[in-house]
Image: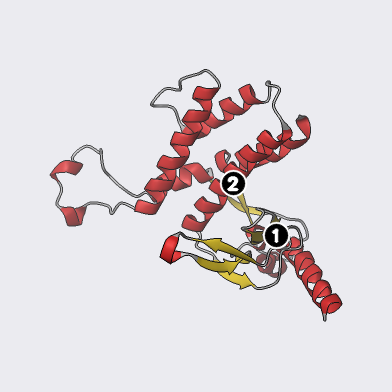
């Protein structure tokens, strides 16, 4: 059971713990710094998402303000935070505990993990939970730091799928299974297959994927 637990814990840590922000490689070169250093520590991704909602709904005096004096509500951030909060509370209920309505979802998730790791569960179930949390991390990062997306037309080396079908009825369409997602921090850039949920995190792993794809094209040429 334990082999998949580090994967789940790493995803939970990325979601709930403060995030040290490293210097970019360019900054390291300019400063002449040999070791990897951090320029600041950001709040957890969940806390940043909550702050990104940007609404003063519920604040004292908010109801009496003019519409143009209120902070606009970020619907995407609000919806995602609400979705994550609800799912985490459902997991805790499944563990036999009803969390307080005032409890922070990050604290609930970490408490849930302690209870979860004490159970006898299947590796596939642990992996399934890890994928859910990893998707939350990616969705929050997409809101906080909108990425540049690049469609890759080659087949995924893991599942061999080149295209996936999305939508229903008349809106059904085929899209590439493989995508590259570029962020300012190269360590947070990644490639992913929406067909099998495989992810290559960081520019180094993305380069390895590129080599795999190029080698396969040479063989098939």
Locate residue 218, reporting x and y percent.
Answer: 84, 78
x, y percent for residue 219 = 86, 76
Q: Residue furthest right?
A: 219
Residue at 65% x, 59% y is 192
Q: SS of the residue at dot 1?
A: loop
Q: Which residue is mark 2?
A: 19
Q: In this rendering, which labeled residue sits more in front, label 2 or label 1?
A: 1
**Residue 79 or 217: which is nearer the viewer?**
217
Q: Mark 2 touching mark 1, by CB under 8 A? A: no
Q: Is residue 108 above or below residue 176?
A: above
Above or below, comparing residue 124 to residue 154 in the picture: above
Q: Quadrant of the N terminus?
A: top right
Residue 85: give x, y in percent of width and height: 45, 36
Disc with the residue nearer the chain's start (2 vs 1): 2
Residue located 60% across and 46% down the image: 134
Q: CA distance from mark 2 to mark 1?
A: 16 Å
x and y percent of residue 181 in the render? 60, 64
Q: Which mark is residue 202?
A: 1
Foreground pick, 24 / 91: 91
């Amino acid at each position: 059971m334990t082999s998949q637990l580090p994967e789940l814990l790493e995803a939970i840590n990325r979601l709930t713990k403060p995030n040290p922000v490293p210097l970019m490689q360019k900054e390291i070169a300019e400063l002449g710094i040999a070791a990897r250093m951090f320029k600041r520590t950001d709040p957890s991704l969940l806390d940043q998402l909550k702050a990104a909602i940007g609404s003063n709904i519920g604040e004292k005096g908010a109801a009496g303000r003019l519409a143009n004096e209120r902070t606009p509500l970020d619907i995407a951030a609000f919806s995602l935070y609400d979705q994550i909060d609800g799912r985490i509370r459902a997991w805790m209920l499944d563990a036999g505990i009803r969390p307080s309505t005032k409890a922070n979802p990050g604290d609930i998730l970490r408490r849930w993990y302690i209870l979860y790791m004490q159970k006898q569960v299947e590796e596939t179930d642990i992996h399934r939970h890890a994928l859910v949390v990893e998707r939350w991390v990616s969705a929050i990062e997409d809101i906080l730091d909108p990425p540049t997306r690049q469609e890759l037309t080659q087949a995924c080396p893991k599942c061999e799928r080149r295209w996936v079908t999305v939508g229903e009825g008349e809106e059904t369409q085929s899209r590439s299974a493989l995508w590259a997602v570029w962020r300012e921090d190269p360590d947070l850039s990644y490639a992913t297959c929406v067909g099998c949920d495989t992810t290559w995190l960081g520019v180094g792993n993305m380069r390895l994927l590129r080599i795999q794809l190029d080698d396969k094209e040479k063989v098939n040429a």
